[in-house]
């Protein structure tokens, strides 16, 4: 597993250090991938550098495929303030895959809602904002376990729809999600003049 679909994160300002843990509503999604001796658990403040390293790893192919969209690979693609706000927000999920004390994967998801209009129905859904597994740990079921943790979190919130944006060049991710019953519903086309 471990394919990435990098979505642009919304800028968030930090209110300081994390004052509460999110484990109270995520313990039900923690699990152990016995095949890899990998634990799927809620992210903690001390996971920031491990998650940032994975963001950098996943950022490079996106920058290479779309240099007009992505800037040069930043040292910290996710700011510490944004990370801390994700951990504090009840409408955000950040889970990690940990193996022998190292962060080898993560998933970030958030609740989206819209009241609808004269054309579109109202919706409440979970957006998979980022999913990444270390390149050396892929094809071992870790990405699937992380995605299942987000699906279970959504179910616990009473949300039946999950969505993800995948860049067209990322065929591996497209197949990964298709194998897990995610279906394309739209394609955005771009032309640079």
Image: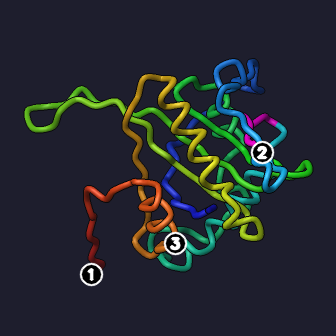
Mark 2 and mark 1 in contact (Cβ < 8 Å)? no
Residue 63 seen in the figure: yes
Residue corresponding to mark 3 = 172
Is residue 180 depicted above or below 15 in this figure? Answer: below
> Hey, which residue is sitting farthest left in the picture?
118
C-alpha separation, residue under disc 3 versus residue under disc 2: 26 Å
| SS at circle 1 | loop
Residue 69 point in image, percent of width and height: 45, 68
Residue 49 seen in the figure: no
Q: From the viewer's perspective, is 83 left or right of 130?
A: right
Q: Nearer the viewer, residue 10 or 138?
A: 138
Residues shaded magenta: 40-45
Mark 1 or 3, nearer chain start? 3
> Hey, which residue is sitting farthest front in the picture?
35
Q: Is residue 79 magenta?
A: no
Residue 178 point in image, percent of width and height: 42, 61
Residue corresponding to mark 1 = 193
Residue 123 point in image, percent of width and height: 28, 31
| SS at circle 3 | helix
Applied colour scheme: rainbow
Q: Residues within 10 Å of mark 2 (few under 14, many from 20)?
A: some
Q: Nearer the viewer, residue 13 or 94?
A: 94
Q: How many marks?
A: 3
Residue corresponding to mark 2 = 48
| SS at circle 2 | helix
Residue 153 point in image, percent of width and height: 55, 31
Name the image quarter holding the N terminus: bottom right
């Amino acid at each position: 597993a471990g394919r990435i679909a990098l979505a642009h994160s919304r800028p968030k300002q930090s209110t300081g250090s994390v004052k509460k843990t999110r484990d109270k509503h995520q313990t039900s999604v923690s699990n152990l991938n016995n095949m890899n001796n990998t634990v799927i658990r809620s992210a903690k403040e001390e996971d920031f550098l491990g998650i940032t390293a994975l963001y950098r790893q996943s950022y490079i192919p996106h920058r290479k495929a779309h240099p007009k969209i992505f800037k040069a690979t930043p040292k910290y693609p996710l700011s510490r303030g944004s990370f801390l706000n994700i951990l504090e927000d009840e409408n955000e999920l950040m889970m990690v895959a940990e193996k022998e004390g190292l962060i080898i994967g993560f998933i970030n998801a958030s609740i989206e809602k819209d009241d609808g209009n004269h054309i579109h129905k109202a919706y409440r859904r979970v957006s998979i904002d980022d999913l990444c597994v270390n390149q050396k740990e892929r094809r071992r079921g870790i990405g699937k376990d992380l995605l299942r943790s987000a699906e279970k979190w959504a179910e616990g919130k009473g949300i039946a729809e999950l969505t993800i944006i995948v860049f067209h060049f990322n065929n591996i991710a497209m197949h990964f999600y298709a194998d897990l019953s995610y279906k394309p519903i739209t394609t955005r086309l771009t032309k640079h003049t």
